[in-house]
Image: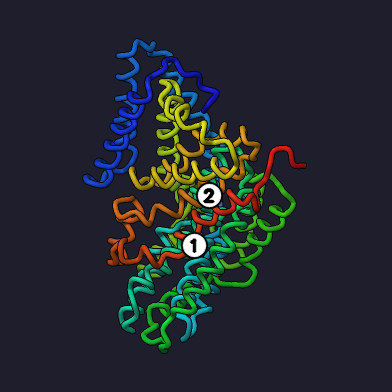
Amino acid sequence: MFRIQAKITPSFMEATSLIAIIIATMAISIGQFGAVPHMPIIMIILFLMAYGSFKKVPYKQLEDGLVEGSKAGLSAIFIFFFIGILISSWMMGGTIPTMIYLGFQTITPHFFYAVVFLVTCIVGVAIGSSLTTIATVGVAFIGMANTMDISLAVTAGAIVSGAFFGDKMSPLSDTTNLSSAIVSVDLFEHIKNMGWTTIPAFFISLIIYGVISPNKDLQHADKIDAFQNGLLQTGMVHWYTLIPLVVLIILTLKKTPAILTLAASSIAAILVSYFHTQFGFGEVMNILFEGYKSSTGLKDVDSLLSRGGINSMMFTIALVLLALSMGGLLFTLGIVQALLSKVESFFKSAGSVITGAAVTAIGINTLIGEQYLSILLTGEAFQAQFKKVGLKSKNLARVMEDAGTVVNPLVPWSVCGIFITNVLDVSTWAYFPFAFFCLLSPILTIVFGWTGKTLSYIDEK
């Protein structure tokens, strides 16, 4: 958004006051009144337009700022359409049910916390949604831990860690697609680059969960059995349903553009579905738009599998457009530039820029409690700073996920934090110290920033 020229130059104190009002509006609306983030953003847009009018900025320039800001998200929006199609096609093709079933096969009587973490990782990657993973298999694991008198706080920490690993690394995840698109980085290149911080965080977390797991037998696993039986009842758990996944991997390795890769994998899933179902052409079109609807009769299984479709992405698309439009106004009115000009003298090295971006993402999560805004605003504000120190944009995309996506569930008043507490009946403060993966990710991204390890520079071939 630095291509948007500021029409006025507010003072640092004026810009700080405006940002404080924006943060307060978001925090109170979401935290106190439980509003969806769209509504306070619309309120803020109106407030900024009123401020611009007071400062004698022509309405046409304010409107241009809104439009220019939203343009930054168009590439993400097109990918979101194909993500919705991919999820619904993988559901009816059996790819996701098979992956989840294989994940449950790893359940053993030992290393309970490690197994919980591992299974939620698999399910999270399979469906690309942390909150759905937590609301389904996470609830099952909490029930098992409660029955066996195992720490609910540690179990919840393992569930949250695994679910957000999946949210971060899945090509089906909206936050993963948003982070790559907002800085114009190929989706699969972004996922590959995140591996430098994510894989160490994964293995460190897995080891810790394994070490602290209690030495108890796995009892009352009826909920897990119910999940597996429900998946089998769909008739979609077969080895050949993994073919769309293979197609996705092969095309990714060949560095095929994301949209073409997603489209090819979706087509493969639709073709595979005819081995075990007989959907008509009209039904397939409806599923791709409205999403797949599971009807096993088991509430948790149906909740897990009823997903996807273009329509399911509209909430995210609307939020992205509104948030970026708000960002366009912030740049048009010179508010972001006024803040960054005060601190950009500190951003002279790769380590300082990465730390600044990470702190910003964490700060937005903490003060506003909104995951998407932490990604959007951090990405737009720091693109120019990363280029100044010679860092490729994929480094920024990684920081946005390491310090944005996975930090949100650690904030008690955030969207994710409130949801998780309500679903698992475990407070955010209780599971916070045991969400090892979420805690390690921002630490590792800052450490690698200062050491220079795993960073990609513009002048590299």
Q: Secondary structure at mark 2?
A: helix
| Residue ID at (46%, 86%) | 109
Which badge, 2 or 1, comes first in the chain's sequence? Answer: 1
Q: From this view, report whether residue 61 is shown above or below residue 137.
A: above
Q: Which mark is residue 124?
A: 1
Query: Could you tell me residue 242's position as x and y percent?
Result: 63, 66
Between marks 2 and 1, how big is the CA–CA gap?
12 Å
Q: What residue sits 51% from the left and 35% below the top?
A: 346
**Dot 2 amino acid type:** Thr
Local packing at callout 2 (Cα closer than 10 Å; few below 14, some 14-19, many 20+) is: many
Q: Which residue is mark 2?
A: 176
SS assignment at label 1: helix
Identify the residue at horizontal 49%, vertical 60% (top origin).
440
Residue contact at pointers 2 and 1, CB within 8 angstroms = no
x then y, percent, for residue 410: 37, 57
Pinpoint residue 328: horizontal percent, then vertical percent.
45, 26
Give the camera-side residue of 351 and 400. Answer: 351
Give the image quarter of residue 149. bottom left
State the residue at coordinates (57%, 62%).
93
Identify residue type, mark 1: Gly
| Residue 129 visible to an observer of this rendering | yes
